[in-house]
Amino acid sequence: MVEAQTWTTRRMSNPRLDSTEQVLDIPPTPPGEHRNSFGSNGGGLSPTVVTALIIASWYLSNIGVLLLNKYLLSFYGYRYPIFLTMLHMLSCAAYSYASINFLEIVPLQHIHSKKQFLKILALSAIFCFSVVCGNTSLRYLPVSFNQAIGATTPFFTAIFAFVITCKKETAEVYLALLPVVFGIVVASNSEPLFHLFGFLVCVGSTAGRALKSVVQGILLTSEAEKLHSMNLLLYMAPLAAFILLPFTLYIEGNVFAHTVEKARGEPFILFLLLGNATVAYLVNLTNFLVTKHTSALTLQVLGNAKATVAAVVSVLIFRNPVTVMGMAGFGITIMGVVLYSEAKKRSKVTTH
């Protein structure tokens, strides 16, 4: 991947998307005259059935890319998280180009200035850091603990918003962040498979995703520079792949030759890599479709539940040990995220 860990995101490759942000930030749905029939009511299905199918696809893609990343990096023995992330980026670039230029799911937007390009490049660099850290953490941590840490994104978002933009939240919002942090402290102290390096890079991924959200709100503010999430993905993905190329060659060695050699003995790995990269794109596509057919608030609510569902499914599949205190800590964090979301909504109402 790709974020995911806001691109809500991680979050393309790593859709450990927290409860308040996905791989890419989703702007308001375009006016009706700009919408394409893609993803609309087709085949005579009722709008309710279509929406249910889209939400199910969102869950399957978000949880699927997590489980595939974990399987490849921890169980299958493919220990190249940077290269895997680069494949996710290339996949997102190719699928985004086809979706926008041929399927026309959204109108194509162009980059109009060097300044706008540099801003997108900066976002791509932050995004790379977040997704690579998220994928790397899956080598060392179980998905359940990975998701618990990822749920703390609102905490880092509030910190970066205050430090970078001096934006202050209400006391209720800050108080709601206390159980978010306390729950992770409890879960960390009781995690049977705790790994310090894995924990640190997972925290780095979560912080990076929050930083991207704040920086994106600062850089792409003017109407001329705002890009739809799918167009932003179209431009960010190839830039991210270009950034990651020298790192994968320097850190992971001749990963291309190793992958080819492994594919000769086990062709199934090609199917795994292609499927994994495709699902990484579907995370971003379903983010857009859920918002189009419901609302950004629905996406936020789904994100609150996704971490829990992903944790439960991963435990059932990978059989990693869990403790009562670990589950309690995870529950406290999720409760804090829900309280934070409600507090944010109330603060917006009072300010308006």
Image (cartoon, rainbow, N blue to C red):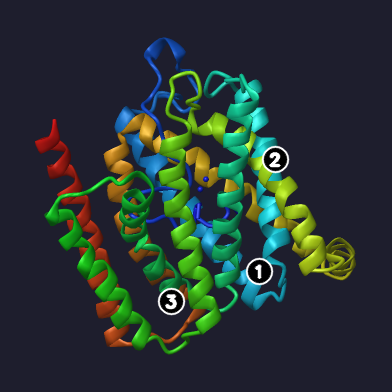
Q: Nearer the viewer, mark 2 or mark 3?
A: 2
Relative to the observer, which residue lies in front, 171 or 86?
171
Q: Which residue is mark 1?
A: 72
The amino acid pointed to by label 1 is Leu
Q: Which residue is mark 3?
A: 315
Q: Kindly give the residue lying farthest to the left in the view shown.
A: 350
Is disc 3 surrounded by few (<14), some (14 to 19) or many (20+) residues within 10 Å? Answer: some
Residue 218 percent across, percent down from the top left: 43, 37
Could one spot residue 211 in this view of the protein? yes
Quadrant of the snapshot with the N terminus: bottom right
Is the residue under label 2 in contact with that under label 1 (CB below 8 Å)?
A: no
Alpha carbons under labels 3 and 1: distance apart:
16 Å
Which residue is at a point 72% across and 54% down the rendered structure image?
244
Determine whether 61 is above or below 202 in the image.
Answer: above
The amino acid pointed to by label 3 is Val
The amino acid pointed to by label 2 is Pro
- Left of 103 or right of it: where is 318? left
Determine whether 168 is above or below 312 in the image.
Answer: above
Q: Kindly give the residue lying farthest to the top in the view shown.
A: 33
Is disc 2 surrounded by few (<14), some (14 to 19) or many (20+) residues within 10 Å? Answer: some
* Image quadrant where residue 175 sits: bottom left
Alpha carbons under labels 1 and 2: distance apart:
23 Å
Tag 1 or tag 3, which sits nearer the N-term? 1
Q: Which residue is mark 2?
A: 238
Could one spot residue 272 in this view of the protein? no
Which residue is at a point 25% across and 79% down the rendered structure image?
328
Which type of secondary structure does the marked residue at label 2 adopt? Answer: helix
Q: How many numbered marks appear? A: 3
* Image quadrant where residue 110 sits: top right
Is the residue under label 1 in contact with that under label 3 (CB below 8 Å)?
A: no
Which type of secondary structure does the marked residue at label 3 adopt? Answer: helix
